[in-house]
Image (cartoon, grey):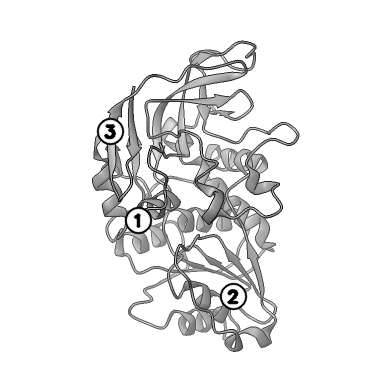
Amino acid sequence: MKAAIYQGKHRFEVKDVPDPQPGPGQIQVRITYAGVCGTDVHGFQYDNVPPGTILGHEYAGVVSAVGKGVTRWRIGDRVVGGGGTPPPGGGHPAYFSPRFTFSKEGWKVSKPGAYAEKLLMEEWEPLPVPANVSDLEAALCEPAANAARAVRRSGLRTGDSVAVLGAGPIGLFTLQVLKASGAGKVIVSEPSPARAAAAAKLGADAVIDPTKEDAVQRIVALTDGNGPHIAFDCAAAPQSLQQALDCVRRNGRVVLIALAWEPVSVFTVDWICREVELVTTLGAQDEDFKATLGLIASRKITMEPLVTDASIQPLDRIQTTFEELMKPRNRVQAVFKL
């Protein structure tokens, strides 16, 4: 099979490698679409992915072989890359290790991913794709589920005003989940013209270019001088966490979704007196995947305008695609068609 293997020093190489063979309790999945996650781009950008790694954790595919003892799946079943309920003590260590640190352990626990024609999954890992959900939509369930988890952890109440800093895929999915969950005014801050346009099309009540105006002042002004109830940092920009903490109202809540791979500065005396709460979130669990598949199936989450014809690339263009995504001025989402 064909696979894109990270070689180190900001370089991928697409090679032919042996097909993975399912063992007992495993299934082989033929990948149809694999989305590009911002975390993978950061791993490429900062060269902290171990050489020899096959990345890719946003995907959908078709069961192409089953191992001994597998009863849940048959060859030809369409599956989402994740969302199953792990057995007791199983699943990603980020959710049960008492001192998990992504910078030190995140890449080490990764298994071969979806930037390849086939991969292996444990029988319990995937979810079935609903009949009215396309493979392309299913491939982006994982980042949308990240957004669903973040909104769940935010404690959003009906009518709350919200700021979303950063309109990459996670920010745009967060915007949609917020709207589906009963948020009031949702204000988005995003410098990229393509991503700002996508936010406006998806229903943002206001879209701010932080390179042209003071984002904090504008967000506060748009929320009657109080600031929003909740702010989501989906950007991992040097100033975005400080902006989120600055803009929320007294007793407001900041939800940190983005993983910043460089130190960010916060000036505590600007916001500490308002007794702001900071909440962190990572990835998605089974309940988030299942809720998100329902939102996609009911058309409360759409992939438009995140994905256009130009978004879909062959795996052979992985090097160029990752280089472009480091400064995504004219691109929102990238997806590999395998």
SS for dot 2: loop
SS for dot 1: helix
Q: In x, y percent, where is residue 228?
A: 59, 75
Q: Amino acid at mark 1?
A: Gln
Residues under labels 2 and 1: Cα distance?
33 Å
Q: Give neighbour class at mark 3: few <14, some 14-19, many 20+ (Cα, 10 Å).
A: some
Mark positioned earlier in the residue sequence (2 or 3): 3
Let me know if residue 213 appears in the view: yes
SS for dot 3: strand
Depicted 62 relative to depicted 160: above or below: above
Asked if the residues shown at circle 1 and circle 3 are in contact, with their CB atoms under 8 angstroms apart, the answer is: no
Asked if the residues shown at circle 2 and circle 1 are in contact, with their CB atoms under 8 angstroms apart, the answer is: no
The residue that label 2 is drawn on is 228
The residue that label 1 is drawn on is 45
- Residue shown at 50%/60% (left/top)? 259
Instruction: Choose mark 2 or mark 3, whichever is in front.
Output: 3
Residues under labels 1 and 3: Cα distance?
18 Å
- Residue shown at 32%/42% (left/top)? 7
Mark positioned earlier in the residue sequence (2 or 1): 1
Q: In x, y percent, where is residue 71?
A: 64, 13
- Residue shown at 55%/40% (left/top)? 298
